[in-house]
Image (tube, rainbow, N blue to C red):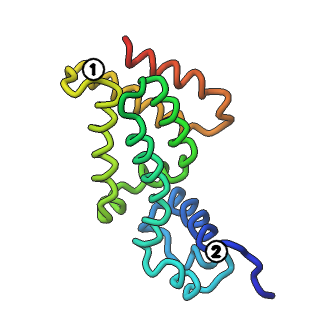
Amino acid sequence: MPRTRVDTSAEIRAVAAELFAQQGVEKTSLREVAEQLGITKAALYYHFPSKADLVRGIVQPLLDDVETLLAESEGSDATRFLTDYFDAVLRHRRVLQLVIRDVGALAQLGLVEQMLNWRERIYHVLVSADATPAQIAKATVAIGGLQDCALTEGPVEDFRDAALAAAIAALRS
């Protein structure tokens, strides 16, 4: 029976992201991804010529969202940035799980370095360019805490406001 899928690339990314988040990039074969989708490995390669291309295709929307957020955040207040950052991370929670689970595989693609470079840019949004170590520590706790909360399983409504309040309190303490 012919497949009636509209966006095969998006489906491949979704299934691969779930498998990569569960098993890790290295432990997940493209054959497993293809089998899960009910397509041939050749069809998968048509959309993504390599596993590296597939990983980039999965991570790129997170990278793009955070890059856009950072570009638009110059001069914005910390509360607005933290709220928007939490929402961006929440939208990409499965991708972030993949990143955390398999940093080594992502490092080979140069993606971890890009994500670490965000840290400096985030510091400039949350604290001044000449921030003290204490201010940087508070910003790190605020951002790291938000990321961890966004990865928490369960209804977002149960922890979103509390996570944002805690991040803002950490930043301002």
Vertical relation: 132 (above or below) 143: above
- From the image, tell me which residue sits under label 1: 135
Using residue 72 as the reference point, say whether residue 88 is left or right of it. right
Left or right side of 126 for 3: right
Q: Residue at x 29, y 64 (%)?
A: 108
User: Disc 2 residue type?
Assistant: Thr
Q: Is residue 66 above or below residue 28?
A: above
Q: Nearer the viewer, residue 37 or 32?
A: 37
- Depth check: give the residue in front, 135 or 127: 127
Position of 98 relative to 129 (above/below): below
Q: Which element type, helix, strand or loop, lies under badge 2?
A: helix
Rendered-image quadrant of the N terminus:
bottom right
Q: Which residue is drawn at the image coordinates 52% and 56% (left, top)?
A: 21
Q: Quadrant of residue 155?
A: top right
Residue 137 in the image: state x and y as whole percent.
29, 24
Residue 105 in the image: x percent, y percent? 36, 63
| In the image, residue 3 above or below residue 131 | below
Crowdedness of circle 1 by 10 Å Cα count: few (<14), some, many (20+)? Answer: some
Q: Secondary structure at mark 1?
A: helix
Q: CA distance from mark 1 to mark 2?
A: 46 Å
Kindly identify the residue that appears in the image at 36 percent across and 28 percent down.
75
Q: Quadrant of residue 140?
A: top left
Q: Which residue is mark 2?
A: 8
Q: Residue at x 50, y 62 (%)?
A: 58
**Tag 1: residue type?**
Gln
Label whose residue precedes the other's in the sequence (1 or 2): 2
